């Protein structure tokens, strides 16, 4: 464990809306998170300091998009091969 002091950067600090001491489920009730000196909204994961940046997509959403793109290319290629082989 470390200490929060002026001039130091924390690896991760979480600001909870509700106390987790009475109910551990409140640990997911996150207002803000600070990671490497950058402040993020807990609900959206958008960066709000030192500059505003939208979070974007999770890696698995990007993987799903790539898989869909590959599947559609594969279907197109199959259709073209079928036409070519029929001639």
Image (tube, helix red, strand yellow):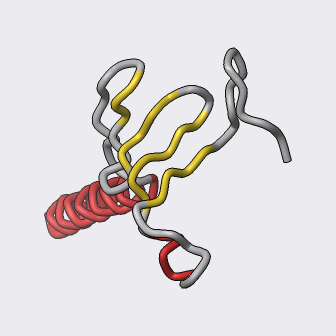
Q: Residue at x 62, y 30 (%)?
A: 36
Q: Along the line of sight, which residue is nearer the eye, 69 or 32?
A: 32
* Up/down of 1 relative to 5, above or below: below
In the image shown, does 84 or 62 lie closer to the viewer?
62
* Residue at the extreme top of the image, as rendered: 7
In percent of width and height, residue 48 lies at 34, 31
Q: Is residue 37 left or right of residue 57?
A: right
Measured along the vertical axis of the image, is residue 38 above or below residue 85?
above
| Horizontal arrangement in the rendering, residue 26 relative to residue 4 (left or right) | left
Q: Percent x, y for residue 81?
A: 25, 62
Q: Residue furthest right?
A: 1
Quadrant position of the C terminus in the picture: bottom left
Q: In which quarter of the image is residue 56?
A: top left
Please tell me whether residue 22 is drawn above or below residue 58 in the rendered image: below
Report the number of discs: 0
Using residue 17 as the reference point, say whether residue 23 is left or right of it: right
Image point (50%, 29%), residue name: 38
Give how far across and how far down residue 34 sits, in percent.
53, 38
Position of 70 relative to 26 (above/below): above
- In the depicted view, which residue is nearer to us: 50 or 71? 50
At horizontal 14% and vertical 64% (from top left) the residue drawn is: 83
The residue that appears at 40% across and 61% down in the rendered structure is 17
């Amino acid at each position: 464990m470390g200490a929060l002091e002026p001039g130091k950067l924390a690896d991760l600090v979480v600001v909870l809306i509700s106390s987790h001491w009475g109910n551990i489920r409140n640990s997911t009730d996150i207002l803000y998170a600070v990671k490497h000196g950058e402040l993020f909204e807990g609900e959206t994961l958008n960066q709000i300091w030192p500059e505003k940046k939208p979070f974007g997509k999770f890696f698995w959403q990007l993987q799903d998009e790539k898989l869909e793109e590959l599947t559609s290319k594969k279907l197109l290629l199959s259709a073209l091969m079928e036409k070519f082989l029929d001639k």
